Image: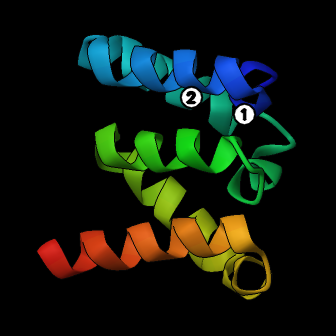
């Protein structure tokens, strides 16, 4: 979680999510999900990119959990410039389905 909120650390976490095997990506997502500050990631200048990447690579229950989290925090995300990016990503992904 700490790395996800840093300018360069967020790039590292994103790259790990994208380049690692499915099992390792799931482990990273699991670590993010157990953090008590996960909702902060949605509205963070760098963390929102990590969250979007996690959404793009997640599958199954982890993906459903992340989507549910976005739904739960939609009112707060609408009033945050970085949160709006997460909502826009979710809308684009729902249109593709």
Does 10 sit above or below residue 39?
above
Determine the residue positioned at 29% across, 14% down: 19
Residue 34: image tag: 1
Determine the residue positioned at 51% across, 55% down: 65
Which quadrant would the C terminus be assigned to in this image?
bottom left
Q: Position of residue 39 (x, y in %)?
A: 77, 55
Determine the residue positioned at 56% across, 28% down: 30
Left or right, 46 with respect to 16, comes to: right
Determine the residue positioned at 55% across, 23% down: 11
Does 14 sit above or below residue 60?
above
Q: Give whichever of 72, 77 is nearer the camera.
A: 77
Determine whether label 1 and label 2 are within 8 Å by CB: yes
Which residue is tagged 2?
A: 30
Count residues near mark 2 (Cα–Cα under 10 Å), then give few for <14, some for 14-19, many for 20+: few
Q: Secondary structure at mark 1?
A: loop
Rendering quarter of residue 50: top right
Q: Is residue 20 at all visible to an observer of this figure? A: yes
Q: Secondary structure at mark 2?
A: helix
Q: Is residue 97 at all visible to an observer of this figure? A: no
Residue 53: image tag: none
In the displayed orientation, state which residue is furthest to the left. Answer: 97
């Amino acid at each position: 979680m700490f790395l996800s909120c840093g300018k360069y650390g967020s790039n590292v976490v994103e790259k790990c999510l994208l380049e690692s095997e499915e099992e390792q990506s799931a482990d990273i997502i699991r670590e993010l999900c157990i953090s008590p500050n996960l909702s902060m990631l949605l509205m963070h200048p760098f963390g929102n990119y990590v969250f979007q990447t996690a959404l793009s690579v997640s599958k199954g229950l982890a993906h459903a959990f992340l989507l549910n989290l976005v739904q739960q925090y939609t009112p707060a995300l609408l009033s945050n410039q970085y949160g709006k990016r997460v909502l826009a990503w979710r809308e684009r992904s729902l249109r593709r389905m």
